[in-house]
Image (cartoon, rainbow, N blue to C red):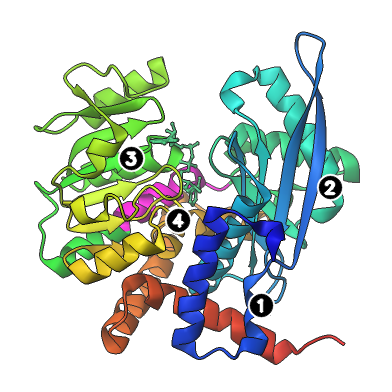
Amino acid sequence: MDLYDHPTFAMAARQFDLVADHLGIPDNDRDRLKYPKRALAVSIPVRLDNGNTKVFQGYRVQHHLSLGPTKGGIRYHPDVTLGEVAALSMWMSWKCALTGLPYGGAKGGVTVDPRKLSVAELERLTRRFTQEIISFIGPQIDIPAPDVGTNEQTMAWMMDTYSVHTGFSVPGVVTGKPVHLGGSLGRREATGRGVAYLAGRAMDMLGIASTGATAVVQGFGNVGSVAAYSLAQQGVKILAVSDVGGGIYNSKGIDTRALDKWVTANGTPVGFPDSEPISNSDMLCLACDILVPAALERQITEANAGNLRCRILAEAANGPTTPLADEILDRRGDIFVIPDVMCNAGGVVVSYFEWVQDLQSFFWSEQEVVDKLFRILEGAFVQVTQQAKRGKLSMRIAALSVGVKRVWEAKKSRGLFP
Ligand code: NAD
């Protein structure tokens, strides 16, 4: 199918094919599981502050509808394409199924560099995008959330636009909202916290003491920054962090509290005192216990997989490792991979909690949220590590197998219509 042609979609499809071979899924069932159920492409005309009008392209892809509404983030990035969004929606399906959530996967995006728009332009873009996809989303249909380049404010604008359309407040249409609008305590931190929790479990398993262990974090946005702070709280020394503008390194460890203040004031870790610059590519190959890619897809490839010097690869980003890199990591056998569909699942798990709280108008304490989150991640970790050991599988194939199998079983039970 050419519609979704993109290297990231090819990568997700390749992973699916490997899992389908492992599970023995018949050819007849494969395309039905692999390709998105439906996709919407929209043009978004936006009046710019200078009076000109610019048209942006936006997408929303719903991967499967067999287990409930669909769920997934909205990305604002200049490289967004339909194929990339489709790949991300497929991974969301396996992630939701792996963690037992009653959702299919979805993803959306707009091809835009949000850093080049004013706040007022971003608001107009978000409201018009929401309007264009309004019949495609809803608390029982498809529930967006933040992803790269979007945040709580973006979700507040989406929720408001949808609510104006219906004539009453509908907080359950998006998750990752501000807490005072029906957001969940602990949602903003959930993905990074989950990454640190699972990295901690991997350290336990490998006999690495967290105090004095070292970590490198690529991408210092929502997920990467919280992962770095949460790891630091466990006693882990953060050697290097980066964003799109470059990286910083300190062999003695970066003071994450001071870095937090610096980033709040300057918008980037670059230039942080008491550190030296390092490139994004060099930092991936630093010797460390935990490497956390928390930026974009396809960062660990056949070109650098042989040079990684970490013991644990905690995939906070979606799709950071290509299938060719996976082959190299499998051959090496010395790096414990926490695959993306499990590693960053904390975000969608707490999004699910937010949706449940919104539907019931009954809100939980942060401690309840964190306890329930860790219980679900623990269950996934135990199941996937056992499956990997029993079947002599890579952690990626084991994690994807659990997710794909659940969706496959749901589709088999529901049957083919008509
Ligand atoms: P974000 O926009 O808050 O942060 C992204 C960070 O990556 C920024 O610091 C940006 O400067 C940096 N970056 C971009 N390109 C880079 C490059 N080439 N090299 C180094 N850094 C680069 O986004 P986020 O929400 O933190 O998402 C990060 C990753 O986590 C994405 O893959 C996303 O799909 C995934 N994820 C996010 C969530 C969530 O809850 N936000 C949940 C699950 C997975």
Circle nearer the viewer, 2 or 3:
3
Tell me the kind of residue under disc 2.
Answer: Ile
**Which residue is under mark 4?**
319
Q: Could you tell which of marks 3 and 1 lies nearer the N-terminus?
A: 1
Between disc 1 and disc 4, whose residue precedes? 1
Say whether mark 3 is within 8 Å of ligand 1: yes
State which mark lies toward you, 2 or 4: 4
* Placement of the N terminus among the 4 image quadrants: bottom right
**Between marks 1 and 2, how big is the CA–CA gap?**
28 Å
Mark positioned earlier in the residue sequence (1 or 2): 1
Look at mark 2 in the image and give the residue it sits on: 134
Q: CA distance from mark 4 to mark 3?
A: 14 Å
The answer to the question of whether label 2 and label 3 lie on touching residues, with beta carbons closer than 8 A, is: no
Q: Main secondary structure of the magenta part?
A: helix
Please state which of residues 236 and 319 is positioned toward the viewer in this rendering. Answer: 319
Vertical side of 275 occupied by 63: above or below: below
Residue 6 as seen in the image, left or right of residue 37: left
- The answer for how far apart the CA atoms under marks 3 and 1 are is 34 Å
* Left or right of residue 19, residue 335 in this image: left
Q: Which mark is residue 31?
A: 1
What amino acid type is highlighted by mark number 4?
Answer: Gly
Q: Is residue 24 magenta?
A: no
